[in-house]
Image (cartoon, rainbow, N blue to C red):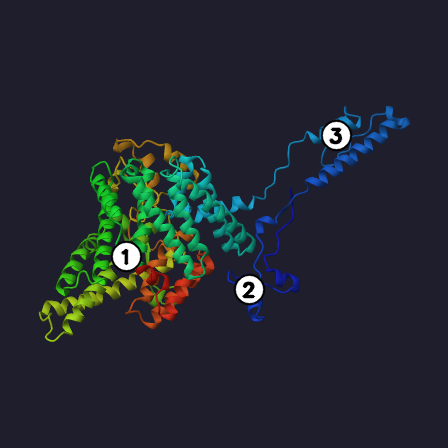
Amino acid sequence: MVYCGKPSSACHACRQRKTRCDALPNGCTQCKRAKRQCPGYRVQSDLVFRDQSANVIKRAKAQERKRSVKSESPSSNASPAPDTDDSIILDSESQDGEDLELVVRGLPPMLSLQPEVENMATCYFNSNYSVGITVPGHGEFNSVTVSLIWDLMDPVLATSIKATSLASFGHHVRSDELAKSSRVEYTKALKMTNAALSSPSQVKKDSTLVSVILLGLYEMITGRNQKSMKDWAAHVRGSSALLKLRGVEQFESPIGRRIFIQAATSILTSCLQRDMKPPQHIIDMTRELEAMAADPRFPEYMRRGTRIFQTNLAFADFQYKVNRGIMSDLRTIVDTALELDAPFADLYANQPPDWSYVAYVDKDFDPDIVYNGRYHVHWDTWALALWNMIRLFRIMIHQHIRGALLKGLAMNPPIFTAAEDYAQLERSMNMIYQMQSDILSSVPQALGYVRKTSVWREATPESGVPASFEPVFSPAYFPPLSSPEPIVSSIAAICSATPSSSSSSSSSFSSFIYGSPPADNARTHVLTKSPSGPSSNAFALLWPLWYTGFMELATDDVRKYVMGNLRRIGNEMGIQQAFVLARTIETKTEPKVWQEDEK
C-alpha cells in the first residue's frame, strides 16, 4: 500500500469545476448557490492509500528476466552485484526462472488497509445503535451485540444486521448503491426470518426475535412514506407473537429479559400511536418480570424500571378505554389519570442520583438547536431517554385530565364546581407545558451538540451501585449506567464475567458498567456547532419530540422548532422516517396508517 497524501474533501461537482468547496454535511454552498443537487463527498479513508501489489509483482518479474539474461551471457561466472533498487530482493541462489517464479508466488499476500464496505457498515451500525462508543451512554440495540456473541453469528441474524447496517451507513454517506444493496439483503433477511418462524427449532431462538426487531428498525431508517410505518407495525406485531410463543421461559436468561423489554417497548409505542389495547400476554408477562425484579438479588434500577413500564402499560389500557368510550364517566377519568400520574410525580420529587440532570441557560447559541435559550445536560444519555418517555406519558395523562375537566365545566349544569377542580385544571395545564419544555430542552444533548469536557468518576460501593448484579445493556426502561471505558473493546469479557458478591471486589466489574454523576453542578460540557453522537440518541428522541410538536397546545414556534429538528435527524443521522413525521406536523394530520389500524 502506498500513501498518496491527503485527498481533496470537496464534492465531485466542485472538483470538476475546480472551485473552492466548504464540504458542509447537507451539501456545499457552491452547489446551493448554483441551485443544483450536491453529489456528496468521497470517503477519505478510501483514498489515502493505493494498492500497488500488481506493480510490485510486475517489477519482480522484470528482475527475474534480467537475471535470466545475465546467467546466459559469457560473463555470467562473475557474481552480479545485488540490485537494491527493487522493492523485492530475490534470493541470489535462485538463478533459474522457475525457482524465481516460486519465490514471487510464495510471498505473503499483500494486506489491504482499506476495509470492505460491509465491515465499515457494520462498524457504523455498532457505534451508532449497538455499542456505546461515547461515554456516558449506550446504544439502542445492545442486545444485538450480545446475541451475536451468544448465537455465534446465526445466519438469519447476520443477514438482518447486514441489511440494517448497509441501510444506515448508506444514508450516512449518501450512497444509492449501498441503499440498493441493503434492499437486496433486506429481502434475503425477510425470507430467512420467515423460514425461521416456520422451524420449531429456530422460532424461539433469541436471534430470531432480534432479527424481527432489526427488520422494524430497517423500516424506520429507510422509510420515506407512511407505508414504512405500516411495515414497521407489522414487524412489531410479529415480535409480539414471538414473545407470546416464548412465554415466561425467556426470562430465565439475561439476554431474554433484555430482548423482551426492548420488543415490549416498541409494542407499547405502536399501541399508543394506533389507540389500541396492549396485548394481554404482554401485560401478564410484565407482571411476571416485575415479580422477579422484586428479588433482592436484582438491582434497584431494575425494580424501578419494571414499575414504570407497568404503569405505562396501564396508561395505554386507560387511553384505549377512554378513546373508545368504554370509560366515559368524567370524574372516573380524572381520578384514574391522577392515580397513573402518581408514580411519575413521586419520581420527580425523589429523583435517583443516577438519573440526575442539570438545566442551563444560553441565549446566544443557535435558537434552532437550543429552544428558548434553555437546555438540559444529563450525565447519562439513557437517563435522558428515560426522562423523555416519562415526560411524554405525563403530557398524555394531563391532557386527559384537562379534556375531562373542560368537558365537565362546559356542561349545563357543570359537574365540576369545586375550587379544587379549577386548581387541578391549572396544574394540568402547567404540567403539560413544563413537560413539553423539558423535552425540547433535551434536544441539544440528544442530537450531539453537548460535548463533555470531563471524565466521569468510577462507581464505588458507597454510590449505591450493588456489588452483585446482572449486566444490562439495552432496555429503554432499564437504563444501564455508563462506564469510563468503551464497551466495544471488552464486550466478550462482560458476557463471560462473574460478578463477585463481595462489596470490596465490586470495583473491577460493576464500575466497568456503572459510572457516577459529577460531584457537583460545575459545568462539565460545552455546546458545539459540530455535533457528534450515536444515532440511537436521536432514535429514542423521535417519538417524544414529534408528540410535543403535534399536540393541540403546541405553538407555531414549537412546531417550527420540532419540524426543523426532525428534518435534521433525517438529514444528519439517516433516520428517514423523521421526514414523514415532520410532514404530519406541517399538515397537522395524523398518519393515515395509524387511523386505518384503529378500525
For residue 39, which quarter of the picture? bottom right
Specify whether 102 is left or right of 306: right
- In the picture as drawn, the residue positioned furthest to the bottom comes out as 412
Disc 3: CA contacts within 10 A as few (<14), some (14-19) or many (>=20): some
| Disc 2/disc 1 C-alpha distance (Å) | 45 Å
Q: Which residue is rendered at x = 67% and y = 31% of the image?
A: 107
3 and 1 marks in contact (CB < 8 Å): no
Image: 398 above or below 499: below
For residue 130, which quarter of the picture? top left
> What amino acid is found at the position of numbered circle 3 in the picture?
Glu
Residue 380 seen by the camera:
no
Q: Which residue is rendered at x = 44% and y = 58% of the image?
A: 223
Q: Nearer the viewer, residue 44 or 585?
A: 585
| Disc 3/disc 1 C-alpha distance (Å) | 73 Å
Callout 3 secondary element: helix
Q: Quickly name the residue at label 1.
A: 276
Specify whether 531 is left or right of 512: right
Callout 2 secondary element: loop
Image: 536 above or below 485: below
The x, y position of residue 67, in whole percent, is 81, 30
Q: Which residue is rendered at x = 50% and y = 47% of the image?
A: 185
